[in-house]
Amino acid sequence: MNIMSNRMINILVPVISIVLGLIVGAIVMWVSGYSPVTGYSALWNGIFGDSYAIGETIRQISPYILAGLAVAFAFRTGLFNIGVEGQLIVGWFAAAYVGMAFELPKIIHLPLALLAAAAAGAFWAFIPGILRATLKVHEVIVTIMMNYIALHVVNALIKTLSGGGFKLERIHQSASLRSDFLSNLTDFSTLHYGIFVALAMVVVMWFILEKTKTGFELKSVGFNDHASRYAGMSVNKNIVLAMVISGAFAGLGGAMEALGTFGNMSSMGGFTGIGFDGIAVALLGANTPLGVIFGATLFGSLKYGANNMPNAAGIPVEIVSIIIALVIFFVACGYIIRIGLIRLRKNKEAK
Amino acid sequence: MDYVIEMLDVSKKFGTFYANDHITLQLEKGEIHALLGENGAGKSTLMNVLFGLYQPDGGEIRVRGEKVAITDPNVANDLGIGMVHQHFMLVENLTVTENIILGSEPTKSGVINIKDSAKKIAEISKTYGLDVDPYAKIEDISVGMQQRVEILKTLYRGADILIFDEPTASLTPQEIEELLNIMRKLVAEGKSIILITHKLQEIMNVSDKCTVIRKGKGIGTVITAETNPEELATLMVGRQVTFKTEKGPSHPTEEILKIEDLYVNDYRGVAKLKGLNLTVRRGEIVGIAGIDGNGQSELIESITGLAKVKSGKILLNGEDIANKKPRKITEAGLGHIPQDRHKHGLILDFSVGYNAALQSYYHEPFSKNGLMNYKVVNEEAEKLIQEYDVRTQGVHEPARALSGGNQQKLIIGREVTRNPDLLIAALPTRGLDVGAIEFIHRRLIEQRDSGKAVLLITFELDEVMNVSDRISVIYDGAIVGTVIPQETTEQALGLMMAGHSKDTAMKEQAAAGKDGDEHHVE
């Protein structure tokens, strides 16, 4: 009767992981002389405290979902796209540029800006894809380097376009994802329609992988490229395609920032980090579309909610970072907890 | 009776499933005792119990008359039990000596003492006629040699009871013969051997006794000299097994495959096929006999479009398919059972249903307008499972969970269902038990009888002799001769496989036959 089902284990693992992470985090706070109770209530309030916080948290989750999808999609075809960061940056720029440079009706302008972001990200990922497919250059190296190229090219473009300044003009209202309705609903937070774009893309990824012929091939190549070649699939075509789709997701992640959160683009001193966190998001979500939502929610909530800990509980930013990292660490170690649970179940069965 | 090992009424349960159901096995000192059973019958479980990897749920184990509890492999080692695993556990870029001492390196003032160990290894090697160079690197020696290193490893650690787990699975016919000699030598020197296998010929050749298990139950122990392969097969499978593959005469008609003057280089640019010519006609099975590495892989890969053809023609139904894309060739009427079913034949993480559709997913009714119809995929897979007797829990089970024989049935089903004019079967029965082998041979012959052409590539001499209608022998990238199985002998084939022309092989064979007759007269 009380034997755990697999489904139950699947639910228990992340829950136990998070609790363990929080416990160790509490110890860190306690040892450093801060009250874990105050600390965690500040974190809780930062995430769910009021409608404003909830709005900001959801806003933060959107780009994480897209970055996570980008990494997960490439993974499913056996590719490690570490270039999500760069693809996101060029996507951000493309969306911001289209948003400010044209004046069009919203029904055309907004989709066009989103499309530009997706296309820019796709193009940025196409390069490592084609190099891998034709010349066998490993995509990890190329994508890492493409990140730096993206960062500095975009900074240079911003400088040129703004006549020596440090940021682009604001986008026109017709390209914005901002929503008065959502903003009012959440006590004037910056919550925008981007979350719907992100969720739509979750469905798109699921649809491609689970419903289309292309998805069948992509997964097949990801599991075993030798057998796929035997079965007459073009492994090279699928590698390029997987990178392009992955890059498009990443580019849309950039559009969240350009058309929603910031409404423009400033020259950047360093990486946003969203693309790199996307790797962890994808891994936490086991590279499945639904899992990515879970991973992105965890990342986005902790990232945003933690901002409240220094203010409300006086805990230094460094300690906060340690606690966030601990929670993620334990979630990533879920495998160990899973084994523990399965062993527990076996013992029970034996009795 | 002087038993070195007695496993009495041993049982092992996994959940509610009995992997070993009250099995008894008694090993006498100085004998080779075969343990026979189909894949999944419980042979490995029983040996893992003996080696301390599993704990038995019932029964008792006696070693040299004393009751023992073998709680882990170290205990087994101390009792003098050594195991030669099917998959070698060797570090490729270390030497033989380094591999053997790994884990218990002898030291002399803190430095590993390779020299003394190497000397000791050389001595053991000499005693048993193993002929292993202690300083050779594992990656430089043949598979047969690597296996001897595994044997040496157990001897070096003082084992006098050796368990061989499917030792001949990856060996060439010559290497198998040598291994059997080594085993004879080992027992002559006082060691005792348990041989796990499902190859009946080996049991007949080398063992003194044979214990048969079927579906986890002990069927009985027979004395090899008093039995025959047919009886063993019946005991193992539980029903009559036909050995000689039954088939009528072939009625070949027009040519399906015609290869003319084919030259192919491998990826390093080394010439592997050097002017190969071959024809396969409708209604016949052509066997390619040869020692591994004489161009078989390149031949398969060039026909299937995976290797680049340097020059020459490959005509399939009259159309030159050299250097065409694999899918173009498949659609021109080729089916293919690849030699490595895990690497090339299946996507192990995909479900049985997906794997069944691997060659047909891209056209209707499996997909339409770019969308998959998984309902149809699974329905068709269901039919295939029924028809080809693939034992699986269902179309959603991952292919990885199937046994080797069932994986192979799945591949054959997939390829034959597409109704190809030419079916290439590369090592189709490697690692399979007699039941599965029989099934697969029958399917190949059915293909032939329905007017299709079959090209069989194998390293097993009896397979090529039994199943083929014509045998082409490949040596160093070319066909050295084509013979009819009824008109030739394994010896003549062996000579041709070593590079002799058909004429010389036949002549030597005739001379040898004459000698034999004379002896007979005496």
Image: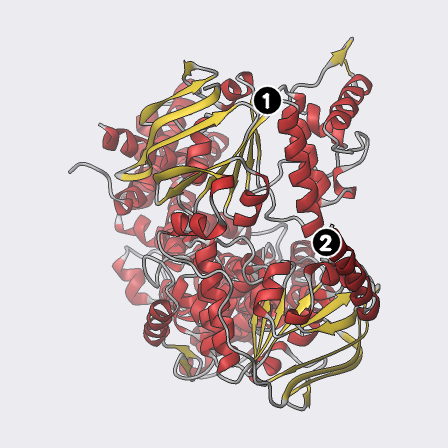
Q: Secondary structure at mark 1?
A: loop
Residue projecting furthest to the front: B522
Residue at (35, 51) in percent of width and height: B238
Q: Quadrant of residue B468?
A: bottom right
* Color encoding of the figure: secondary structure
Amino acid tagged 2: Val
Residue at (66, 19) in percent of width and height: B104
Residue A154 x, y percent position in the rendering? 65, 63
Q: Earlier in the sequence, mark 1 or mark 2?
A: 1
Give above or below for B120 relative to B212.
above
Q: Nearer the viewer, residue A137 or B354?
A: B354
Q: Nearer the viewer, residue B221 or B290?
A: B221
Residue A265 can be seen in this image: no
Q: Quadrant of residue B337?
A: bottom right
Which label was assigned to residue B307? none
Q: Secondary structure at mark 2?
A: helix
Q: Which mark is in front, 1 or 2?
A: 2
| Left or right: where A78 falls relative to A53 | right
Residue B30 can be seen in this image: yes
Amino acid tagged 1: Asp
Q: Quadrant of the N terminus of chain B?
A: top left
| Left or right: where B464 falls relative to B221 | right
* Residue on which disc 2 sits: B521
Q: Nearer the viewer, residue A190 or A320?
A: A320
> How far is mark 1 from mark 2, CA to CA?
44 Å
Give above or below for B477 relative to B291.
below
Which label was assigned to residue B160? 1
Q: Quadrant of residue B499?
A: bottom right
Residue B378 x, y percent position in the rendering? 34, 70
Chain of the residue under label 1 = B
Residue at (78, 56) in percent of width and height: B515
Q: Classify 10 Å Cα crowding around label 1: few (below 14), some (14-19), many (20 and above).
A: many
